[in-house]
Amino acid sequence: MKIGTDIIQINRIEKSLKRYGNKFKQRFLSTSEIDIAHRIETIAGFWAAKEAIAKALGCGIGKDLSFHDIVIAKDNKGAPCFNLTKEAQKLHRIKASSLSISHDGGFAIAVVVIEQ
Ligand SMILES: CC(C)(COP(=O)(O)OP(=O)(O)OC[C@H]1O[C@@H](n2cnc3c(N)ncnc32)[C@H](O)[C@@H]1OP(=O)(O)O)[C@@H](O)C(=O)NCCC(=O)NCCS
């Protein structure tokens, strides 16, 4: 089992959104993620989640794992989960995972546990 965590100031995401608009979202979110991330704190949570996943996998965001290799979704109660794209899954071979996101006081935080 590997654990990963990340925290981000929500106003950093807000500034980038104001400056670059949809281009900024598209840089790290897929269409399905953009469809479910309506609030800035949710978008910040998704950013933190992807960084946390990259830490748990021990590679960081880079050549072995891009933001677009990770796809976050929500279950019918609103709980987040994620999948890797087929290509990334071939490399990282995740068997099971659990993702939790929270935001308060201007910060978004994500914690992930991954079994490979
Ligand atoms: C889920 C819940 C506890 C969130 O607590 P909160 O203090 O209001 O908000 P937080 O900032 O800590 O967390 C919000 C994040 O929790 C996650 N979340 C939402 N529903 C969730 C759920 N059912 N289970 C796990 N995580 C959930 C989401 O990622 C959400 O952020 P996002 O919508 O921006 O992506 C609260 O909304 C709640 O009680 N919901 C209804 C009951 C429920 O489904 N409970 C199950 C979990 S105990």
Image (cartoon, rainbow, N blue to C red):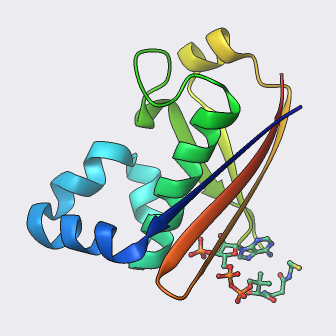
For image coordinates 41% across by 23% down, the residue present is 62
> Residue at position x 58%, y 52% from top?
49
Residue lying at the far left in this picture: please name it.
Answer: 19
16 displayed left or right of 8 = left
Q: Quadrant of residue 20?
A: bottom left
Q: Nearer the viewer, residue 34 or 12?
A: 12
* Residue shown at the point (61%, 46%) measured from the top left: 52
Q: Is residue 106 left or right of residue 24?
A: right
Q: Is residue 49 above or below residue 61?
A: below
Q: Nearer the viewer, residue 113 or 72?
A: 113
As drawn, 50 above or below 2: below
User: Would you place residue 37 above or below residue 47 in this image?
Assistant: below
Which quadrant of the figure has residue 78?
Answer: bottom right
Percent coordinates x, y for residue 10 in the rendering = 40, 74
Ligand 1 in which quarter: bottom right
- Residue 33 at x, y = what percent? 47, 55
Relative to 59, say whether 112 is above or below: below
Image x and y of residue 11, in percent: 32, 77
In the rendered view, does 111 fall on the left or right side of 91?
right
Q: Between 86 and 40, which is closer to the camera in this rendering? A: 40
Q: Quadrant of the C terminus?
A: top right
Q: Is residue 15 left or right of residue 69?
A: left
Outermost residue toward the bottom in this view: 105
* Count of marks, rendered view: 0
Q: Residue furthest top?
A: 91
Q: Quadrant of residue 9?
A: bottom left
Report the residue at 29% width, 56% height from top.
25
Q: Position of residue 105 (x, y in %)?
A: 53, 88
Which quadrant holds the N terminus?
top right
